[in-house]
Amino acid sequence: QVQLVESGGGLVQTGGSLRLSCTASGRTFSNGVAWFQQAPGKERRCVAVIHWRGGSTYYTDSVKGRFTISRDNAKNTVYLQMNSLKPEDTAVYYCAADANSVLASSYRYWGQGTQVTVSS
């Protein structure tokens, strides 16, 4: 069984930065890891995916050039560096593991979520 623990959320002003972390315990990552965001009243949507072995990445258009997903194999951790944050980035961010997909239904393992709030 894999457990994902997220950290790094918080309150930041427009234009600020945050770095989210997602660490797996139970076994190492072997497939893809993604970050999803879910704003109040909206569906959970994928913002970034990283393939654990090859390192290839995907970003949704709204975060390209501002967010960077990366991994640290030794620490079994995936990061989401978020720069130039906007109020519309406000959401709960979830880490998900064990697929290479933008679909939430593809992922077996989920973190507990971390709140990101961007004030205007």
Image (cartoon, rainbow, N blue to C red):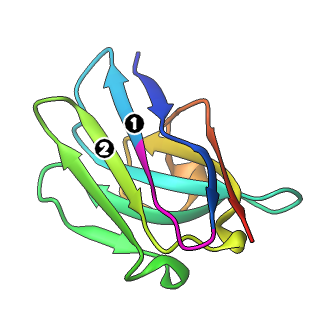
Left or right: 26 in relation to 43: left
| Mark 2 element type | strand
Placement of 24 over or under 51, stated as above or below: above
Pointers 1 and 2 in contact (CB under 8 A)? yes
Q: Is residue 15 on the magenta stretch?
A: yes
Quadrant in the picture for residue 82: bottom left
Instruction: Tell me residue 100's x, y (percent).
Output: 36, 57
Q: Residue at x 20, y 67 (%)?
A: 56
Name the amino acid, label 2. Answer: Val
Instruction: Tell me residue 1's x, y (percent).
Output: 41, 15
The reply to whether residue 102 is in sight is no
Instruction: Tell me residue 97's x, y (percent).
Output: 41, 41
Name the amino acid, label 1. Answer: Cys
Q: Residue at x 42, y 53 (%)?
A: 34
Q: Is residue 72 on the magenta stretch?
A: no
* Residue annotated with mark 1: 22
Placement of 15 over or under 27, stated as above or below: below
Q: Residue at x 48, y 53 (%)?
A: 35
Q: Residues within 10 Å of mark 2 (few under 14, many from 20)?
A: many
Instruction: Tell me residue 86's x, y (percent).
Output: 63, 74
Q: Nearer the viewer, residue 108 or 95?
A: 95
Left or right: 14 in relation to 54: right
Quarter of the image with the C terminus is bottom right
Q: Nearer the viewer, residue 42 or 103?
A: 42
Placement of 91 over or under 115, stated as above or below: below
Q: Residue at x 34, y 26 (%)?
A: 24
* Residue annotated with mark 2: 78
> Which mark is first along the chain, 2 or 1?
1
How much space separates mark 1 and mark 2, taking CA atoms? 5 Å
The residue range painted magenta reads: 14-20
